[in-house]
Image (cartoon, rainbow, N blue to C red):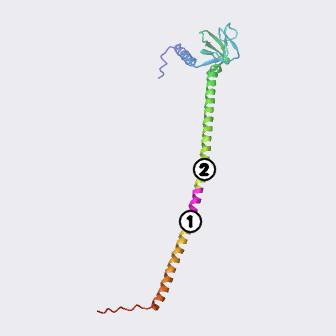
């Protein structure tokens, strides 16, 4: 069963119109601005045939009160509280460039400052990288010198070991040769006679 069937017939169109006006009032809270060049005139009604009641500068923020889709006009309220009708094509949604320009300029300045700061940081990092590279080169040269010294010390140690080994072989050979000569000479030496003790 349709719950609206018991309502009076004139009540349904009135309810539809009320909902439409309520929806227009909700849309009126959105930001709008005059998008025409320099000054734009507004009228006392939705059309050029109505009397001009004022003018408004381009970029001025306005509040849209109503829309007339047939005439393609919207009723606006200016910041000073004046109302009038103006062509819908002269009103744009959002925020005007007049208001956005200072914000965009601040964002641009902040971005430029950030770019400058990052460029300074990059230069500092490059300088640090260059000094670290030079230090690495110096360390590499020191390591190469130490390696050469180690190689030279190892050669010296090896040559000392070989000379010591040859010296010991020489000493051993001389001792062995001396022992052999001594062994050959001892049998030919005169033997000492034993002394006889007489009382």
Instruction: Read off the residue under disc 2.
Output: 138
Could you say which quadrant of the image residue 93 lies in?
Answer: top right
Nearest to the observer: residue 129 or residue 110: 129
Residue drawn at 58 percent across, 62 percent down: 152
Residue drawn at 47 percent across, 91 percent down: 188
Coordinates of residue 16 in the picture (x, y in percent): 54, 17
Could you say which quadrant of the image residue 130 lies in?
Answer: top right
Crowd tier of the residue under label 1, counting other residues whose Cα lies within 10 Å: few below 14, some 14–19, many 20 or above: few
Q: Main secondary structure of the magenta part?
A: helix
Using the numbered discs, state the Cα–Cα distance from disc 2 to disc 1 in whole angstroms. Answer: 27 Å
| Mark 2 or mark 1, whichever is nearer to me | 1
Coordinates of residue 23 in the picture (x, y in percent): 55, 18
Crowd tier of the residue under label 2, counting other residues whose Cα lies within 10 Å: few below 14, some 14–19, many 20 or above: few
Residue 76 among magenta residues: no
- From the viewer's perspective, is residue 85 above or below residue 175? above
Asked which secondary structure carries label 2, the reply is helix
Mark positioned earlier in the residue sequence (2 or 1): 2
Q: Which residues are magenta?
A: 144-154
Placement of the C terminus among the 4 image quadrants: bottom left
- Tell me, for residue 137, which label it has, or none: none
Instruction: Read off the residue under disc 1.
Output: 156
Asked which secondary structure carries label 1, the reply is helix
- From the viewer's perspective, is residue 104 above or below residue 82? below
């Amino acid at each position: 069963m349709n719950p609206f069937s018991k309502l009076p017939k004139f009540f349904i169109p009135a309810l539809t119109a009320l909902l439409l006006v309520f929806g227009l009032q909700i849309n009126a809270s959105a930001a709008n601005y005059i998008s025409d060049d320099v000054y734009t005139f507004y009228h006392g009604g939705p059309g050029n045939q109505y009397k001009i009641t004022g003018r408004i500068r381009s970029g001025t923020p306005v509040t849209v009160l109503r829309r007339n889709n047939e005439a393609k006009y919207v009723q606006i309220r200016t910041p000073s509280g004046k109302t009038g009708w103006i062509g819908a094509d002269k009103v744009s949604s959002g925020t005007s460039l007049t208001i956005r320009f200072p914000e965009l300029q601040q964002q641009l300045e902040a971005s430029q400052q950030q770019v400058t700061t990052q460029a300074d940081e990059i230069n500092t990092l490059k300088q640090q990288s260059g000094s670290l590279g030079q230090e690495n080169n110096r360390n590499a040269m020191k390591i190469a010198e130490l390696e050469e010294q180690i190689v030279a010390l190892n050669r010296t140690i090896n040559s000392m070991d070989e000379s010591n080994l040859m010296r010991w072989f020489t000493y051993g050979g001389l001792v062995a040769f001396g022992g052999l000569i001594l062994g050959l000479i001892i049998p030919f030496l005169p033997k000492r006679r034993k002394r006889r003790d007489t009382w």
